[in-house]
Image (cartoon, rainbow, N blue to C red):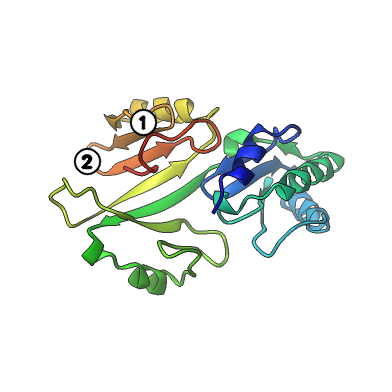
Amino acid sequence: MSEDGWREFVSGEGVDDWVVLHGGPTAVFRTASLQDAARLAVAVSGVSGLTPRTILTAASDRLTVKLTREMWGTEREHLEVARAISAVAREHAAVSDPSAVQEVQVAVAAKPDAIDLPFWRAVLGYAPLHDDNGLDPLGQGSTVWMQDLDPSKPLRHAMHLDVSLSGAQIETRLAEALAAGGRIVDDSGAPAQWVLADRSGNKVCLVAWPDGARPASSTAGG
């Protein structure tokens, strides 16, 4: 895996419609109706350079386009593909909405001898992409990622959510979560990530990486 692809995409010109999340370059284009979103999907499907990992999701007021299933799969060629898709969207009077771009990931942390990824893949009907994750074949559900549990923690396993957002949106989402009763558990990784908890102590990580911030010394995920 290489960082060159997503780094070049993040710093590239002409891709303001796009956000690089954990799942790679993603854009949301607002439309007037489901029918308009479907027509736009057909037009986008004709763009040269799309791969089998490209996902188009049409909804009543938008088309979401994911170029890859992971940021590490981002290649330099995706820059031209993204620009071409944006041009098609403009031709169809669809307006990009980077604030609507997000990805939710379920992170299951466990001691090495308690990692049980085969179970999660089987029970969810997910497919592997790498040795530490499972992906929804339809591209609709959350990614499941297995990570090593901090040896200093007394638990043998734990689960939390990662919410991957653009750097431009994360502080707004943070403020909304705090106003809704959440609390900050760890801000040592800010502005790349904040670890929050609800009143019962259930954790969630707001992550603005790689799009809007460099990661802390550790990989995203609380």
Q: Residue furthest bottom?
A: 122
* Residue type (three-letter) at the residue carrying disc 2: Gly
User: According to the image, label 2 marks what residue?
Assistant: 201
Q: Residue at x 68, y 65 (%)?
A: 52
> Furthest residue to the left?
154
Quarter holding residue 91: top right
Kindly check if marks 2 and 1 are in contact, taking CB atoms under 8 A apart as contact: no
Q: Nearer the viewer, residue 14 or 151?
A: 151
Q: Secondary structure at mark 2?
A: loop
Marks 2/1: CA distance? 19 Å
| Image position of 53 (left or right of 213) | right
Is 69 or 3 nearer to us in this picture?
Answer: 3
The residue drawn where x is 46% and y is 25% is 171
Q: In front here: 117 or 98? A: 117
Where is residue 84? Give x, y as percent: 81, 45
Q: Which element is circle 1 on?
A: loop
Tell me the number on the disc at residue 120: none
Q: Examine the rendered structure and indicate whether residue 170 appears above or below residue 152.
A: above
Q: Is residue 56 above or below residue 161?
A: below
First-in-chain label (2 vs 1): 1
Q: Residue 184, image x and y in percent?
A: 29, 29
Residue 106: x and y in percent read 39, 54
166 relative position to 48: left or right: left
User: Which residue position holds label 1?
Assistant: 189
Q: Which quadrant of the view contains residue 217? A: top left
38 relative position to 92: left or right? left
For the point 55% across and 59% down, the residue is 140
Report the residue at 66% width, 40% height from top: 9
75 relative position to 126: left or right: right
Q: Closest to the observer: 211 or 172?
A: 211
The amino acid type found where label 1 is placed reads Gly
Quadrant placement of the C terminus: top left
